[in-house]
């Protein structure tokens, strides 16, 4: 159990800094060597993820399988830029999971996360979490489109800068803004109860 957690943490870190690894790989090694290393990493990720069953893990597994195939195609046809598709696939994966969670009879992802801290969410908070889930869906759509643009039309430097830094900063800003809005709404609700 602990070994699986350690492996998962290492791979999560690897894929968090994936654009920087690709940039350094292309800069200091050959594109072929970098793509082979990525192929091995995705193969190992698939071996780890196949044991997990949550919707997010299944979606991440599908993205890892696509990246494994893209790496193989890249090696066979010398199309090494295909390994730069990963940020796009991750945005699509998260968008799909968040969207699926809004289905009838399902709990929105943000509500599930909120219930970890506050199991008995008031009804107004449930509506709020549904709206926040929609905001995250919009973010993942926009992020995926920008990632695609950097993949297709930008230099390696721009691709790395956006996907390895700016997208995370934007995600952090969204987290921060949502946190401040949540505090304001919570304060307003508590004032109405008095």
Image (tube, grey):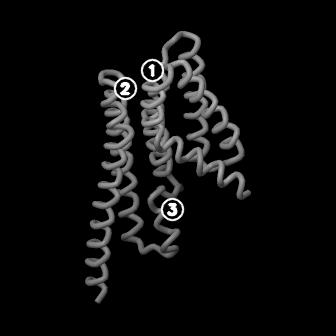
Counting residues from the start of the chain, the first of labels 1 and 3 encountered is 1
Mark 1 = which residue? 81
Q: Nearer the viewer, mark 1 or mark 3?
A: 1
Please identify the quadrant where the N terminus is shown.
Answer: bottom right
Mark 3 = which residue? 112
Task: Report if the CB atoms under discs 2 and 1 are less than 8 Å apart.
Answer: yes
> Within 10 angstroms of label 1, few (less than 14), some, or many (20 or more) residues?
some
Q: Nearer the viewer, mark 3 or mark 2?
A: 2
Counting residues from the start of the chain, the first of labels 3 and 2 encountered is 3
Q: Give the percent coordinates (x, y) of residue 25.
A: 48, 28
- Give left or right: position of 184 versus 7: left
Q: Give the percent coordinates (x, y) of residue 81.
A: 45, 20
- Give left or right: position of 20 versus 63: left
> Label 2's element?
helix
CA gap, disc 3 to disc 2? 33 Å
Q: Residue furthest front?
A: 28
């Amino acid at each position: 159990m602990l070994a699986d957690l350690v492996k998962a943490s290492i791979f999560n870190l690897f894929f968090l800094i994936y654009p920087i690894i690709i940039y350094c790989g292309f800069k200091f090694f050959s594109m072929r060597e970098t793509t082979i290393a990525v192929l091995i990493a995705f193969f190992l990720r698939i071996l780890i993820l196949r044991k997990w069953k949550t919707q997010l893990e299944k979606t991440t597994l599908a993205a890892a399988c696509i990246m494994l195939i893209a790496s193989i195609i890249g090696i066979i046809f010398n199309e090494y830029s295909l390994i730069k598709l990963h940020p796009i696939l991750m945005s699509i994966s998260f968008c799909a999971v968040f969207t699926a969670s809004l289905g009838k009879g399902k709990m929105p992802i943000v509500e599930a996360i909120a219930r970890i801290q506050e199991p008995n969410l008031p009804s107004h908070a449930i509506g709020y979490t549904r709206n926040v889930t929609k905001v995250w869906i919009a973010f993942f759509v926009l992020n995926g489109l920008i990632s695609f643009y950097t993949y297709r039309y930008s230099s390696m430097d721009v691709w790395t800068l956006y996907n390895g830094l700016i997208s995370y900063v934007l995600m952090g800003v969204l987290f921060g803004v949502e946190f401040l809005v949540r505090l304001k709404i919570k304060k307003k609700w508590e004032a109405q109860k008095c």
